[in-house]
Image (cartoon, rainbow, N blue to C red):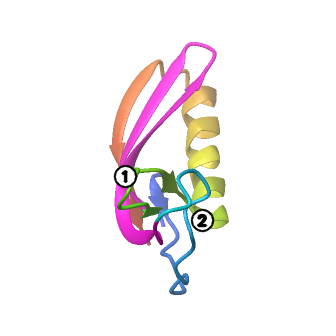
Amino acid sequence: MNQWEAPAMKREVPAMKCVICKQADTRPGTTTVTLERDTLTLVVKGVPARICPNCGEEYVEEDVGTRLLELVEQAANAGVQVDVRQFVAA
């Protein structure tokens, strides 16, 4: 796995009721996540997420969130200011 790849979602996550609108069960999909830290802006596209079909709220699993934080840490340490990347599952 290179530094930009992320671990695959290894398990099917059961649907959950949206905690924002409380009207619908979330569905699997992908989203774009923007992370900012000091002068760094990192945009990651194609991030696996659970998405509410009613209000559009997006939820990422803990392992995906951990990987996103690792990516932003690596980019910050490399002195990146702005970057757009595709989320790649290993």
For badge 2, the amino acid type reads Glu
For badge 1, the amino acid type reads Thr
Q: Which x, y percent locates residue 6? A: 49, 63
Is residue 83 highlighted in magenta?
no
Q: Please give left or right for residue 40 compared with residue 77 in the image.
A: left
Q: Nearer the viewer, residue 1 or 33?
A: 33
* Residue placed under numbered mark 1 in the picture: 31
Q: Please give left or right for residue 85 compared with residue 25 in the image.
A: left
How packed mark 2 is, by other alpha carbons closer than 10 Å (few <14, some 14-19, many 20 or more), is few
* Highlighted magenta segment, given as a residue range: 24-48
Helix, strand or loop at mark 1: strand
Position of 75 relative to 9 (above/below)? above
Q: Please give left or right for residue 76 compared with residue 2 in the image.
A: right
The structure residue drawn at horizontal position 53% and vertical position 84%, both measured from the top left corner, is 10
Position of 40 relative to 22 (above/below)? above
Magenta span: helix, strand or loop, mainly? Answer: strand
The structure residue drawn at horizontal position 49% and vertical position 63%, both measured from the top left corner, is 23
